Image (cartoon, grey):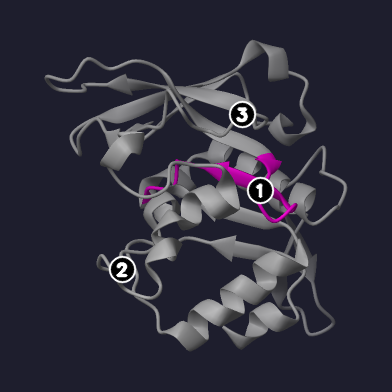
Amino acid sequence: MEALKEADVAVFFLRWRRLPAEQIQYIEDYLKTGKPLLGFRTTTHAFNYPKGHPLQKWNAFGELAFNSPPGWGGVAKHTHYGHESSTDVNIIKSEANNELLTGVGDNFHVRSWLYQVLPSYPIKGSVLLMNGHSINPGDKNAYDNPVTWTGTNSYGAKFFFTTMGHPEDFDQEPFQHLVINAMHWVAGKKIPKNWGFRRLVSNSGSIKKNWL
């Protein structure tokens, strides 16, 4: 956690943690700097402190940091369409030329079961980039929900967030593009138009791979 003191970008992928106060302090100090963040999936319900706990407010970390629902269930009605379902992802037409979507493609499929964040989230002012449509939602009345958005959080920091992030999602090249683009964007770096691996041969003749 001490790395947050020097970090330029913080990436959060948490689920129902109960960190001690001294570790939460590192997170709070980072948020107060207004530096950028990138968040994945279960970070909407990053912490799960019991009612009355001194750190209970951090159960709403998703809302504080990423304009997402403040935890799971509750008045936000934050839920999902079942572990047996998966998701078709489509770019929102008005954002088709957004640089964050460079190389991503118009649509793709991920293993993640769709999170329901509407109607109250993402918080007004967020920029919605992609919608998800649940496949095999069981007996639930599924409707499209945003799966990727950006914005400015309650600390004045810019962020990128996606409710995607099932382990199998990272095998999908469109999702890989999205993550690489997002990391460049939050860090204030130019998003690469082309990317991949290139083979380099060292002086010793061994082959190395460098990320482009």
The three-letter amino acid code for the residue at tag 1 is Asn
Mark 3 residue type: Lys
- Answer left or right for 63 relative to 4: left
Element carrying mark 3 = loop
Residue at (64% x, 41% y) in the render: 177
Q: Residue furthest top?
A: 93
Going from N to C along the chain, the mark reached first, 1 or 3, is 3
Instruction: Determine the secondary structure under disc 1.
Output: loop
Q: Which residue is mark 1?
A: 153
Tell me: residue 96, above or below residue 3.
above
- Please indicate whether residue 114 sits to the left or right of residue 11 in the image: left
Label number found at residue 124: 3
Report the residue at 34% width, 32% height from top.
114
Residue 142 vertical position relative to residue 207 in the rendered view, above or below: above
User: Which of the image's four quarters has the C terminus?
Assistant: bottom right
Residues at marks 2 and 1, CA–CA distance in whole angstroms: 22 Å
Image-quadrant location for residue 137:
top left
Asked whether 153 or 138 is in front, the reply is 153
Q: In the rendered structure, which segment of residues is drawn in magenta?
A: 151-166
Q: Which residue is mark 2?
A: 49
